Amino acid sequence: MSDTRAAIADNLSAVFPHESAGDLRRRARTTLRTYARDVIDFMRTLSAPRSALESVFELRPDESKIFYDLVAQKRGIVLVSGHYGNWEAGGVFLRRVIDLPLTIMMKTEADPEVNRQRREIRDLLGMESIEIGKSFDTALQIRRRLADNQIVAFLMDRHIGRDRVEVDFLGRKAAFLKTPALMAFMTGAPLMPSFIERTGPERFRVRVGTPIVVRRDRPREDAIAEASQAFADQLSESVRARPELWYHFYRYWDAQREDS
């Protein structure tokens, strides 16, 4: 996987601009090892009894209060994360540990078999999935779920076509997905940054970031740009702290430049 290691090393150059090519390649190998462990532990959680899962996930009391306070507002939650940490295990936590309704907004995989497997896993967990760009009424589906006080989850750090908003990410320009902030603006639901960080074998911390309110008293595009940047800042801080958990296996910055 020399090309993949080279791509990861290139991505990490944004975090470690002064490191040598050899040091970046070593970091890339660490990322691949960490990702492999995350995948294995995620698969284990699918069949683990619920009683066992309570020891797998740690949620600090102060962050738990933030989460449940948002649920109590009954406006729904737009949960946003990035390709950082074990985001798939986050679905296990929400559905099998605290049993809250969850809809995953997903990009269609290039490989139909991978797409099928992902859907089967999410169906097993009782999660709904909506494929972005597959239906004209996607926005209406999202609004209905938020109106029912459900959680709608997005990975925000990859845009899809014209669904994009420019942010500063790790000191470089990038295009993030615009729809999460747009839906929050239209519905009043908060953006809730969340990250699932590995702390040891079969152990994860559920980290709730600072909730982001998309201001509805400002012009729409300005409000969306401000909220998206606020999320990009939180994701940047997370990646800088735990770079081995940042999982893009292609040349992220090259793709950003090609799509600009």
Image (tube, rainbow, N blue to C red):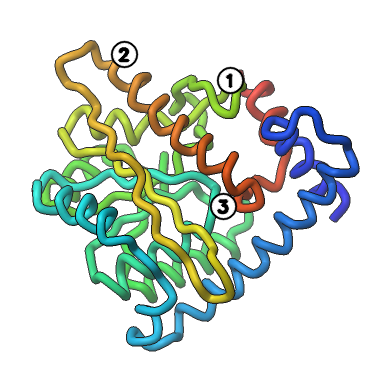
For image coordinates 51% across by 50% down, the residue present is: 108
Marks 1/2 in contact by CB < 8 Å: the verdict is no
Under mark 3, the amino acid is Glu
For image coordinates 81% across by 42% down, the residue present is: 24
Left or right of residue 139: residue 40:
right
Instruction: Please give the residue where the numbered disc 2 appears in the rendered image.
Output: 222
Q: Residue 146: x and y, percent?
A: 18, 46
Q: Residue 245: x and y, percent?
A: 60, 52
Under mark 1, the amino acid is Lys
Q: Tell me which numbered mark, 1 or 3, is placed earlier along the sequence.
A: 3
Under mark 2, the amino acid is Asp
Instruction: Please give the residue where the numbered disc 3 appears in the rendered image.
Output: 109
> What is the secondary structure assignment of the residue under circle 3?
loop
Q: Residue 77: x and y, percent?
A: 23, 46
Label placed on residue 173: 1
**Depth check, front residue: 234 or 181:** 234
Q: CA distance from mark 1 to mark 2?
A: 17 Å
